[in-house]
Image (cartoon, rainbow, N blue to C red):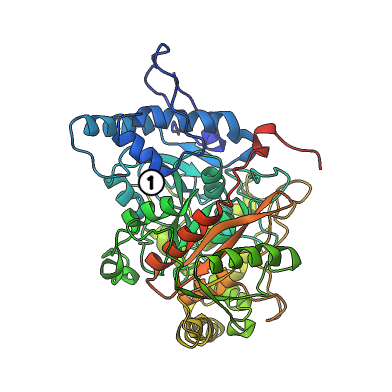
């Protein structure tokens, strides 16, 4: 019998989702398939070649979750029908009816993404009864392609939007830890998804990004992630933070794996108007990957951004040296091309959350109690599972006039123009570069003593310009694609290299990053998580 350990969700009344009851295993069979550090693309090939089965692969991932996730707190739940999904994939393959390259490949999802039959809590007990009636569009597309929908990953509660002192993780999933050093930060919003990809708890993960923090999470956990052009992937079925900024995106251990995921996930959705142009731009992103893709390309580098210092500068210079050796022309861009847009980001999120979470909850199942942000705030005050944490960000959003707020309207228009046409857009038009590169962020910080808080908060209103400009925030407001790939380590902690391109330039960005990745192989798999908590 195959089992998963019980998570916080097992306390939910009437919920029997969290033990994976599988079929019995033939103990005399061959040695189990080893999934650690196996690329999604290699796994797909091995499935196609009959070297393993979807059931065997799914068992192997669940075995790793059971063995290693206790200190990491990356996975919140395994889907109760995961083995059934895998067995169905094996039967399709046997009958010659395979649905595509991802058929039988297990994928985990951030717990603000709806999976039919599972609660979508966004890390809050207020949403414990929010059992999704249907898959989010991003989930459905992967399910329709045969992927095994393995389960849910931990996250920062409401993607990091609750208090000024941002929770590390959530009340439901508890505090996650960086697999490279359990005493250090996994960087918040999509932490569980990045940890799961880094530690081979699944072939890949699907997460969300609002203001670049999802990309930063991948950087800190040593994996590849893509925030696509706004509108390339449907947001329908996501618990929103800001519908202006939110998007889903893939996280995996290589650029090729991210490309394979994006090929399935991209496309227009009649239920999400922002995706109306997606079908005209989507492609098979794997076909464009080429180890020589940087030859003859002109790239612009931004220095002095958030996360750039004397140590990360050395890693960046090494990366630029590699790209020059591959035939790329590197142009130094002026830092004033972008600016600190964190005050605008805070205002946009604060103004939109009340409306957007209300719209989502209005469509929630009848079993769900909270229907508005005001309901969430009230329940938080009295629920002993929630009232140990502040909720200033939620209360500030409740006090605003939503999208009628004049400060919001002014800041949104200004930031979009400044980050887009007057900012990163000028890199492509005035400097003629195919992509902007820079440091994604620095290594993960040490967690607070009780490991429940992150040291850096994106919800603190600071004077404009008090912090260096962030590549991720500017790309998010401009709606531009942003990809991070490992470029080395500091203090044995990963640091990522960012590639940002014009709208719909995912094929170019993926090709650039793949060429760099293949030339450097800078990703070092984590190992510290296998040894338990270190002494501080």
* Residue denoted by label 1: 115
- 413 to 313, vertically: above or below: below
Q: Is residue 128 left or right of residue 102?
A: right
Residue 73 sits in quarter: top right
Q: Residue at x 31, y 50 (%)?
A: 140
Residue 163 sits in quarter: bottom right
Q: Residues within 10 Å of mark 1 (few under 14, many from 20)?
A: many
Estimate the x, y position of residue 307 in percent, counting from the top left. 68, 66
Q: Residue at x 52, y 48 (%)?
A: 193
Q: Is residue 308 left or right of residue 376?
A: right
Between residue 257 and residue 88, name the one nearer to us. Answer: 257
Estimate the x, y position of residue 345 in percent, counting from the top left. 57, 74
Estimate the x, y position of residue 421 in percent, counting from the top left. 47, 86
Between residue 53 and residue 327, name the one nearer to us. Answer: 327
Label 1 residue SS: loop
Quadrant where the C terminus lies?
Answer: top right
Estimate the x, y position of residue 142 in percent, counting from the top left. 33, 48
Q: Is residue 508 left or right of residue 128?
A: left
Residue 302 seen in render: yes
Q: Residue at x 40, y 74 (%)?
A: 503
Between residue 5 and residue 354, name the one nearer to us. Answer: 5
Residue 358 seen in render: no
Name the outermost residue toward the top: 28
């Amino acid at each position: 019998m195959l089992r998963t350990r019980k998570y916080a969700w097992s306390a939910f009344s009437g919920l029997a989702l969290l033990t994976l009851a599988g079929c019995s295993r033939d103990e005399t069979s061959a040695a189990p398939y080893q999934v650690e550090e196996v690329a999604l693309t290699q796994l797909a090939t091995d499935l196609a070649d009959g070297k393993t089965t979807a059931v065997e692969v799914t068992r192997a991932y669940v075995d790793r979750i059971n063995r290693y996730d206790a200190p990491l707190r990356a996975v919140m739940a395994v889907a109760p029908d995961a083995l059934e999904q895998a067995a169905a994939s094996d039967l399709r393959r046997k009958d010659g009816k395979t649905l595509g390259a991802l058929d039988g490949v297990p994928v985990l999802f951030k717990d603000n993404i709806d999976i039919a039959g599972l609660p979508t809590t966004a890390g809050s007990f207020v949403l414990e009864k929010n059992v999704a009636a249907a898959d989010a569009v991003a989930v459905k597309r992967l399910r329709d392609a045969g992927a095994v929908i393995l389960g849910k990953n931990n996250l920062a509660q409401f993607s990091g939007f609750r208090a000024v002192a941002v929770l590390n993780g959530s009340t439901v999933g508890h505090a996650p830890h960086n697999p490279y050093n359990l005493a250090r930060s996994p960087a918040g919003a999509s932490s569980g998804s990045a940890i799961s990809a880094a530690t081979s708890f699944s072939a890949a993960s699907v997460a969300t990004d609002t203001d670049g923090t999802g990309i930063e999470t991948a950087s800190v956990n040593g994996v590849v992630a893509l925030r696509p052009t706004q509108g390339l992937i449907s947001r329908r079925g996501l618990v929103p933070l800001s519908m202006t900024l939110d998007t889903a995106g893939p996280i995996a251990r290589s650029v090729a794996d991210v490309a394979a995921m994006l090929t399935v996930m991209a496309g227009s959705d009649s239920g999400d108007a922002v995706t109306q142009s997606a079908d005209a731009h989507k492609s098979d992103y794997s076909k464009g990957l080429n180890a020589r893709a940087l030859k003859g390309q002109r790239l612009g580098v931004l220095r002095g951004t958030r996360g750039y210092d004397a140590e990360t500068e050395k890693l960046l210079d090494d990366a630029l040296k590699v790209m020059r050796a591959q035939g790329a022309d590197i142009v130094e861009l002026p830092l004033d091309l972008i600016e600190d847009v964190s005050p605008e980001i805070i205002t946009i999120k604060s103004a939109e959350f009340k409306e957007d979470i209300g719209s989502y909850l209005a469509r929630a199942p009848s079993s769900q109690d909270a229907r508005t942000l005001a309901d969430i705030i009230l329940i938080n005050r009295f629920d002993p599972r929630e009232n140990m944490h502040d909720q200033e960000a939620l209360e500030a959003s409740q006090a605003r006039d939503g999208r009628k707020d004049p400060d919001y309207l002014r800041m949104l228009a200004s930031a979009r123009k400044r980050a887009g046409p007057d900012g990163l857009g000028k890199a492509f038009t005035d400097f003629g570069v195919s992509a902007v590169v820079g440091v994604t962020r620095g290594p993960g910080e040490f967690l607070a003593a009780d490991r429940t808080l992150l040291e850096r908060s994106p919800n603190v209103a600071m004077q404009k310009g008090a912090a260096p400009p962030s590549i991720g925030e500017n790309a998010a407001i401009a709606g531009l694609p942003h990809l991070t790939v490992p470029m080395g380590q500091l203090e044995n902690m990963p640091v990522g290299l960012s590639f940002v391109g014009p709208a719909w330039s995912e094929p170019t960005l993926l090709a650039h990053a793949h060429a760099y990745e293949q030339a450097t192989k800078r990703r070092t798999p984590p190992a510290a998580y296998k040894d338990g908590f270190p002494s501080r």
